[in-house]
Image: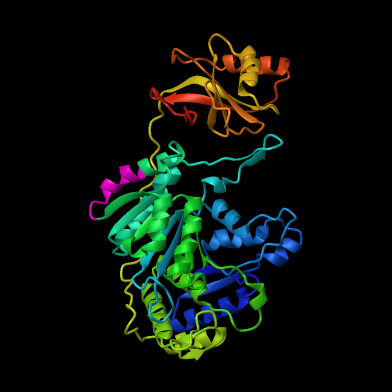
Amino acid sequence: MTRITVAKGDGIGPEIMNATLAILQAAGAQLEVDEIQVGEQVYLAGNMSGISSESWDIIRRNKVFLKAPITTPQGGGYKSLNVTIRKMLGLYANIRPCMSLHPFVKTKHPGMDLVIVRENEEDLYAGIEHQQTDEVMQCLKLISRPGCEKIVHYAFAYARQYKRQKITCFTKDNIMKQTDGLFHRVFDEIAPAYPDLQNEHWIVDIGAAKLADTPEAFDVIVMPNLYGDILSDVAAQIAGSVGLAGSANIGEECAMFEAIHGSAPRRAGQNLANPSGLLQGAIMMLNHLGQTEVAQRVQNAWLKTIEDGVHTYDIYKEGISQQKVGTSEFAQAVIARLGRQPVTLKAVSYAGSKALELPAYQRKPAASKDLLGVDVFVHWPGSDPNELASLVSQISTPELPLSMITNRGIKVWPNGFRETFCTDHWRCRFLTEANEPIDKQGIVQILSKAAELTIDTVKTENLYAFDGKRAFSMGQGQ
């Protein structure tokens, strides 16, 4: 028996969790359950993260967490419980299978069968934001080498275990050459270790268009956090319904499994909700635990139920569905079909599935790191970059002359265009002309002079070369 942690959540959560646990028990899952409370009531009791320290202890002890949807109260500074759990437990990989159930669930893509593997901890979801001027907010996009390596290895290993053929990487590295560029580079570095699998890269915008139009072209897609969050919902919806999709969140020690839809409080307590999304998460949990025969029985019984037209209201269609049922009745229909296989839909076989074993991250030798300059971000309410350049040039030094001013990433000095709209947030770059390393005392001098002249500096970024290669973006424009 494996002891797991269960949270029934809010809204429709208790109903779909009860239905899911009933199916797992009937199928012979070897599970013991510790139930915890998370979500709305915990938030409203004064815990801003929606989870108590005692619940954390239970989750960390059991390592495996099956969670129903929760409600986060509006306003008041409440933190996202999902994001908190993923980060605190190091759940770096989010896995979302998206498969068509044609002709039993309406879709324009009957041949769709793909899996999105999403990096789950970093990117813009680091949540590091600042207001820097009256007009400009900042959100830091953090992409790390270990984060990239772990998620890319996971995607390839997952594809191999589940007999997939191709891995596609989505990034926007034509624009974000440092952050998304690292993700793409790591993908290209790791791909040769899996010669049995095809690999390709798409720029995320055209890749997203292709996904929406021809999802059959993809098999496993791996991508950074934000793109994966958006496109996994898109993929689930065009496959048939977000309400049918489950999700796994995998870390090196712990794992969490859930539906991808919300708590739908308007449907709570009415025995209407479709438990399929949470059930799909639970099936992924069983595979993770090595209980593959049970997972296979449940999935095939679920497919047979869908195939027989036993549908909840959300996917019920006249002429296709045979019987409209509620939450508990749907669970009983799945239980009645345990041991049976679908005829039209493809039956599954999970033999050999287990928690993936991945190579440990090996930190590479430190690069040679040279300081070449500094970007000083200035809050200045004027509109003429030439006027600002005259002011800021006074704080430059012979070692670090002013080389460029940008506004929202567009170069506006020297040789800017008068048509370029400028906010009150300016990046002033001081860069050594000889490309020779400097020490940080030169930056201190610039900031000290700025303070003397009451120039409002709101942020600095040091400009480095690693192993002799400049590791910072240039200004867009001329």
Residue at 45% across / 85% down in the picture? 334
- Residue placed at 68% from the left, 60% from the top? 50
List x then y, in percent, for residue 296. Answer: 37, 76
Relative vertical location of residue 189 with respect to residue 427 in this rendering, above or below: below
Q: Residue at x 31, y 42 (%)?
A: 189
Q: Which residue extends farthest front?
A: 419
- As displayed, is residue 81 above or below residue 29? above
Specify start and end residues of the magenta stretch as a single range: 186-196
Question: In front: 257, or 416?
Answer: 416
Q: Position of residue 207 (x, y in %)?
A: 39, 54
Position of residue 31 relative to residue 330, above or below, is: above
Residue sitting nearer the eye, 417 or 86: 417
Place of residue 203 in the rendered image (x, y in percent of width and height, measured from the top left): 39, 48
> 238 or 95, which is in the foreground?
238
Residue 116 in sight: yes
Horizontal relation, residue 46 to residue 329: left or right: right
